[in-house]
Image: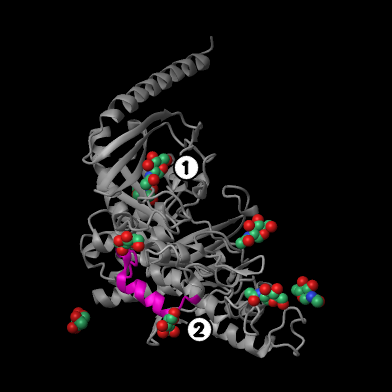
Amino acid sequence: MSLSTLSLTVFLGVAVRLAACSTDKCASLGAQILVPNSTILMHNYFLNGTTIDLPGTVESCGGPNLKANATANLCRLVFTITTSPSSEIQLEAWLPDSHNWNGKVLATGNGGIGGCIDYATMQNGVGLGFASFGTNSGHNGSIGYDFFLNQPEVINDFGHRAIHIEAGFSKELVHQYYGARATKTYYAGCSTGGRQGFQTAHLYPEDFDGMLLGSPGVDWLRVVASKGILARRIGWPYLNSSAYVRPEQWPAIVEAQIREFDSLDGVTDGIIDEPTKHRFDPESLVCGTGLLNSSRCLSPQQVESVRRAYEPIVSASGQIVYPAFELGSKTDVFSENQENGTARLSYTILEDFWRGAVFNNTDWTPEDFNESDMDFAVSVNPGQVNAAEKDLSSFYRRGGKIISYHGRNDETVTSALSEQFFTGVQAVLNITLQDMHSFYRLFFLPGMHHCSGGLSPWSIGNAQKYPYDKTLLDSKHNALMALVNWVENGTAPEIIIGTKYENDIIGGSITAQRTYCSYPMVSRWDGIGDGNLATSWECA
Ligand SMILES: *[C@@H]1O[C@H](CO)[C@@H](O)[C@H](O)[C@H]1NC(C)=O
Ligand SMILES: *[C@@H]1O[C@H](CO)[C@@H](O)[C@H](O)[C@H]1NC(C)=O
Ligand SMILES: *[C@@H]1O[C@H](CO)[C@@H](O)[C@H](O)[C@H]1NC(C)=O
Ligand SMILES: *[C@@H]1O[C@H](CO)[C@@H](O)[C@H](O)[C@H]1NC(C)=O
Ligand SMILES: *[C@@H]1O[C@H](CO)[C@@H](O)[C@H](O)[C@H]1NC(C)=O
Ligand SMILES: *[C@@H]1O[C@H](CO)[C@@H](O)[C@H](O)[C@H]1NC(C)=O
Ligand SMILES: *[C@@H]1O[C@H](CO)[C@@H](O)[C@H](O)[C@H]1NC(C)=O
Ligand SMILES: *[C@@H]1O[C@H](CO)[C@@H](O)[C@H](O)[C@H]1NC(C)=O
């Protein structure tokens, strides 16, 4: 036997012993974990590279054939935690072996109307050595309303409680499992996950040391309501009215915006870098100008509808309460609202949440939805779900850090909301921009859709996107690493470099990169270099 074969055998022997030892620990310690109000449902040990079947997952969360990858040797523990006499949350812990544990916790949030565990971020987290956690936020599923009907405590879990419970539970569980406390506790989420994060920073500032908050749906009720209000502004549900703008007309309208505004940022790349800087006049698309043919062009009433679709949302009393829809973004969320010629909102969250949580009324339908329905929901604020509170002073004072990012081509949560939220927090805290940058940094990604996707180099280690590119796991290219570097090394991120892969396959061959900047700085082409190189973009 050669020396190298011998050492390999020894090495494998050790690895197998360690795995066996961890399996025992997962079974014995896992089963003994004692956290108040919790019941353990499952403890299983998985070897790195094996598949984790998730057959308990409901259909709207991708089940029952959903699978995940064990990205490390890990102990998977599944718990139910009672949160009130009439509610419970599902919580999962994926724990790497002690010698692979980086000493930290990574907790995750949800998307949309909640109810699906964020396995994508958990897989990334455990692969990096984090003890990683996920929750269903108190109900199962991303479609439906029955779980909220007459269930105020379930709404409380989704609204504001689940992530707080997850934070406390994760710290306690890690202490019991590893016999040591986590050195740092992180959170990563996008969309509703971003909302949950900002809300936790406001209500429970001690929960996390660092938070990565993508495309955050703060002011969540208005984010959702805006889809219904815009649908009404373009004539819905009267599909035959002369003011209704049909689904097939919208791609032509959006193309016209891109034609008009794309090049104004110095680069013609199909991307409107700063959509809030422009005003779109649909008059040029009226029938007769020849710009659009007879099946796409707009009648005078439709011109008026399109104009109104790009105006900000106002309350019943006429106050502007939510920013305008993003120019250059796909409009389906408010314009694709028919099925077989019957009016039907495609953005199901509106009907589900108003039916189940706002009105507690199975008969309610959104055909008459208007500003009064939005204002009513905001005044009730079921489960404190809205999360528009800008007072992050306690989080700021305790030294917490937030990295937020937002695509500028976001059809679900208009990116102007992040701009307003950032400046709103600054106003409430009454601190300088320098002080803001000492704890909260916002990065806009022109061209990125909601949370991920789009024409631009959008991959920055986005929350809810698996896998990470293992060759770009550094604080310049991966936002979670940038956050860790900030929290633990004190180095604030000045830039983040985004990457575009061929066919958007993360980790595949790289076709472009771009430098993104800490708001209010913006990413500008230097006017000379190759636009596909990060070095050709600078912060202005
Ligand atoms: C959610 O689904 C899990 C199975 O994955 C089940 O154990 C749990 O009871 C369900 N929770 C609710 C609130 O229905
Ligand atoms: C919800 O509606 C049901 C049926 O009308 C009613 O019995 C119940 O009290 C309502 N619950 C709440 C919280 O309003
Ligand atoms: C629209 O008009 C068509 C025929 O012109 C009719 O079949 C359809 O029911 C109408 N739809 C609505 C929603 O009024
Ligand atoms: C009108 O233009 C659209 C988009 O360019 C095209 O798909 C459609 O076939 C055209 N229709 C007619 C009647 O020319
Ligand atoms: C909304 O509709 C209701 C009737 O369904 C009406 O009473 C209310 O005035 C409307 N609000 C606005 C702002 O139009
Ligand atoms: C529309 O038609 C499709 C195909 O015939 C059918 O599966 C679907 O249920 C219909 N939707 C509605 C709302 O009737
Ligand atoms: C904000 O801070 C400035 C400078 O520290 C101070 O002069 C001012 O009174 C503060 N404003 C409020 C509303 O607290
Ligand atoms: C923190 O600093 C150390 C020492 O410079 C470095 O090796 C490490 O990569 C940094 N952490 C992150 C997440 O960048």
Q: Relative to 48, does residue 326 appear above or below in the rendering?
A: below
Q: Residue at x 35, y 43 (%)?
A: 91
Q: Can you tell which of label 1 and label 2 is closer to the viewer?
A: 1
Q: Are marks 1 and 2 in contact (CB under 8 Å)?
A: no
Spot occupied by residue 392 in the image (x, y as percentages of width and height): 26, 67
Which element is circle 1 on?
Answer: loop
Coloration mode: one colour
Q: Is mark 1 within 8 Å of ligand 1?
A: yes
**Label 1 is placed on what type of residue?**
Thr
Tell me if I can see residue 246 in this picture: no
Q: Quadrant of ligand 3?
A: bottom right
Instruction: Determine the residue located farthest toward the top in the rendered image.
Output: 1
Spot occupied by residue 374 in the image (x, y as percentages of width and height): 40, 75
Can you identify the residue that label 2 sits on? 311
Instruction: Name the mark on residue 57.
Output: 1
Q: What is the magenta range? A: 368-388
**Label 2 is placed on what type of residue?**
Glu
Earlier residue among tags 1 and 2: 1
Q: Relative to 508, does residue 409 appear above or below in the rendering?
A: below
Q: Relative to 170, does residue 379 appear above or below in the rendering?
A: below
Q: Residue at x 41, y 74 (%)?
A: 419
Instruction: Name the mark on residue 200.
Output: none
Q: Relative to 131, does residue 263 appear above or below in the rendering?
A: below
